[in-house]
Image (cartoon, rainbow, N blue to C red):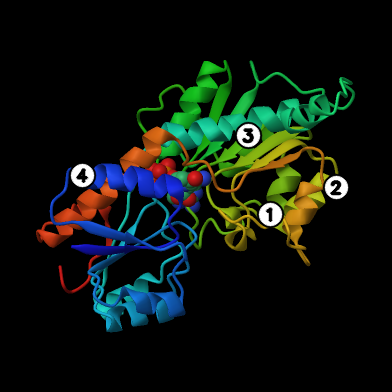
């Protein structure tokens, strides 16, 4: 099983090379570039390609991969909205993913963003470095005895519920499927959750149903002074409506690990670029907004789990018995 690994970073190479020591018969070549129609041509002679969360696996890319003989797309992430699954089905290419590597990794980052935005840690850090010890503008609120609204209570949302419980918060939850393990949370309608929560954290996948679920109507239902966190997918929030809400002083803080325009930015150093027409630049101009670059997954534990499951996916596919729960779309070749 020969894998071509796109958009490889140093931390990817380290954790995958470590795991490969335990596997005979699986080899990986790393590419710095992400996948595109042009770079997909380099996959000739490989059985599989390995891509990440923002890799544009379009129908055209899938067609090129098929022509080059690729049979398997390995997503080293949970989300798969960046892959044209219909094209994969058409060309008989199997798609596998890592459904849950460390839910606490992402949930802890969500709480880190909530705390940083609420207590203005991003501003405090810069001030103190400049010998400015003023506290003006840094006032936050307690989370203790406040209400957390968790939207999507799968693996990561459930971990976020447990963290919020540890903070002494009342927890409201909204999901199309209730999680029976969360007997300390109260499931309710989205409208009630939006209108009663002091902290709202998004943990549902991006689907046709959830696209722009936080729009001007949702923002208008929220309490003044709410903290909003998104570590799930950018397009859950309609950015223009979020910006309008920020301008109307709706939010005490906003913490975003994902945002609609992120794809050109994710994991790239763009410090010398002028971001033209960028809503990202506008978001960054607000004092109560903190943005991280899709780093919710980035802990040693999660990287290890991602590389183990990805290599296992490749090996099990090669043996003809791919782990069913990791298969998103089974190609004809399985
Ligand atoms: P999961 O599949 O365990 O849970 C998702 C939950 O959302 C399920 O309980 C499902 O019933 C619920 N859901 C689906 N449609 C819904 C709707 N219309 N309204 C309300 N709830 C709905 O997924 P998991 O592992 O908890 O991941 C959640 C999301 O986190 C992923 O889809 C991904 O987008 C994001 N993620 C972000 C990472 C980061 O680095 N920032 C890393 C990993 C995942």
- Lateral position of residue 134 relative to residue 99, left or right: right
Q: Earlier in the sequence, mark 1 or mark 3?
A: 3
Q: Give residue 81's quadrant in the image.
A: bottom left
Observer-side mark, 1 or 2, equals 2
Q: Which residue is mark 3?
A: 113
Tag 4, which secondary structure?
A: loop
Q: Give how far across and how far down residue 271 sits, in percent.
A: 71, 55
Task: Name the residue rendered at 46%, 64% in the picture.
Answer: 82
Q: Nearer the viewer, residue 216 or 258?
A: 258
The earlier-in-sequence mark between 1 and 4 is 4
Q: What residue lies at 19% left-to-right and 56% top-to-bottom?
A: 26
Q: 294 left or right of 253?
A: left
User: What residue is disc 2 on?
Assistant: 247
Can residue 129 be spotted in the picture?
Answer: yes
Query: Could you say whether the residue bearing mark 3 is in a helix, strand or loop?
Result: helix
The answer to the question of whether label 3 and label 2 lie on touching residues, with beta carbons closer than 8 A, is no
> How many C-alpha atoms fall within 10 Å of the one at disc 1: few (<14), some, or many (≥20)?
some
Residue depicted at x 47% and y 40%? 298
Above or below, 129 against 282 in this view is above
């Amino acid at each position: 099983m020969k894998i071509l690994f796109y958009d490889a970073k140093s931390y990817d190479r380290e954790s995958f090379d470590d795991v490969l020591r335990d596997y005979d018969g699986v080899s990986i070549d790393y590419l710095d570039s992400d996948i595109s129609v042009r770079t997909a041509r380099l996959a000739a002679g490989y059985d599989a390609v390995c891509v990440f969360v923002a890799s544009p696996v379009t129908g055209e890319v899938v067609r090129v991969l098929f022509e080059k003989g690729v049979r398997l797309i390995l997503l080293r992430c949970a989300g798969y909205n960046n892959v044209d699954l219909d094209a994969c089905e058409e060309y008989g290419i199997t798609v596998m993913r890592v459904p849950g590597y460390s839910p606490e990794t992402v949930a802890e980052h969500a709480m880190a963003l909530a705390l940083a935005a609420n207590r203005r840690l991003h501003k405090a850090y810069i001030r103190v470095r400049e010998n400015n010890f003023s506290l003006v503008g840094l006032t936050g609120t307690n989370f203790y005895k406040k209400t957390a609204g968790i939207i999507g209570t799968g693996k990561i949302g459930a971990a976020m519920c447990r963290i919020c419980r540890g903070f002494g918060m009342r927890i409201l939850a909204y999901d199309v499927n209730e999680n029976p393990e969360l007997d300390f949370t109260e499931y309710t309608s989205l409208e009630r959750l939006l209108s009663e929560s002091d902290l709202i954290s998004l943990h549902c996948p991006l689907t046709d149903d959830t696209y722009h679920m936080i729009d001007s109507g949702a923002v208008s239902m929220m309490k003044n002074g709410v903290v909003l966190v998104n570590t799930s997918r950018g397009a859950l929030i309609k950015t223009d409506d979020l910006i309008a809400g920020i301008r109307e002083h709706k939010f005490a803080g906003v913490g975003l690990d994902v945002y609609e325009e992120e794809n050109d930015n994710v994991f790239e150093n763009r410090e010398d670029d002028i971001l033209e027409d960028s809503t990202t630049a506008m978001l960054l101009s607000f004092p109560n907004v903190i943005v991280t670059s899709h780093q919710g997954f980035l802990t040693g534990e999660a990287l290890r789990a991602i590389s183990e499951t990805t290599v296992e996916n490749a090996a099990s596919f090669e043996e003809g018995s791919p782990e069913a729960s990791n298969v998103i779309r089974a190609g004809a070749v399985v």
